[in-house]
Image: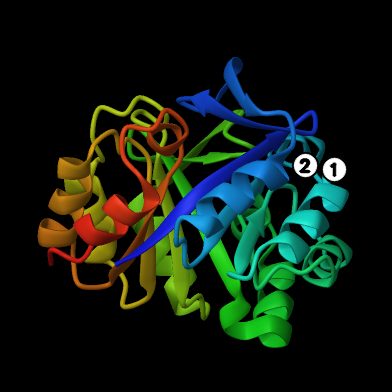
Amino acid sequence: MILYPAIDIRGGQAVRLTQGDYERETAYDADPVDAAKRWAGEGAEFLHVVDLDGAKAGEPQNLDAIGRIAVGVECPIQVGGGLRDAASVASVLDAGAERVVIGTAALRDPEFLASTLERHGERVVVSVDARDGKVALAGWTEAGEEGVVEAVAELTSRGVTRFLCTAIEVDGTMEGPALDELNQIAASTKAHLIASGGVGNLSHLEALARNAAPNVEGAIVGRALYERKFTVAEAITALQTR
């Protein structure tokens, strides 16, 4: 499994939210490029970058930081946050992202998703974020009615080959991933899945590696790395215990 250190950008800083709540923010790096270089220097193979301002605004707000991260590290990055039209997707790819992560628009705009998949193929990741088993939208500020398992199955039928799945209830808590929910989602698709939310120690990563479905290919980790609960190298080793 691949480790994806997370870099969430808000107001130009690298921050972490608890359970997706913009009022429960902890700032870690004044410049997110510092975080990116730290994780890459410790051996990260891929970075996960979220433009939190973009997620709320509906279009990218931190393209300068994204571009500086892409230039500043050798490993590839995937970027999400406010990518709801073709121009936004193109701007992030032009800034140096290897993949784009689309959330709300994938569920609300079938034509946009179809055209993006046709143009960019496997460079597209669809983020399906769940609260109480239901899909959350618009930077987690809106509650959807559709079940996350049903949403992933339907999106798979439309050609999505990689999903990012976040359990909002545990995100930023470091209390452990929502493994049962993750495996229910994994059973509904043959696509690749990246797990996000709840990792607080190495045993959580080892549990993912041993017990997650075979199509779960990676795990996003944020707060635990920033608070030095373990190193990137230790996390990578833990994810190889499968």
Label 2: element kind:
helix
> Where is 49 relative to 90, above or below?
above
Camera-side residue of 133 and 224: 224
Question: Do the residues bearing badges 2 and 1 touch, measured as CB atoms within 8 Å?
Answer: yes
Mark before the other along the chain sequence, 2 or 1: 2
> Where is 80 relative to 222, above or below?
below
Q: Which amino acid, mark 2?
A: Gly
Residue 9 in the image: x percent, y percent? 69, 38
Q: Which residue is mark 1?
A: 61
Image-based side of 141 in relation to 222, left or right? right
Q: Which amino acid, mark 1?
A: Gln
Q: Mark 2: give few (<14), some (14-19) or many (20+) Cα within 10 Å.
A: many
Q: Is residue 84 visible?
A: no
Q: Is residue 140 visible?
A: yes
Residue 160 in the image: x percent, y percent? 51, 75
- Quadrant showing the C terminus: bottom left
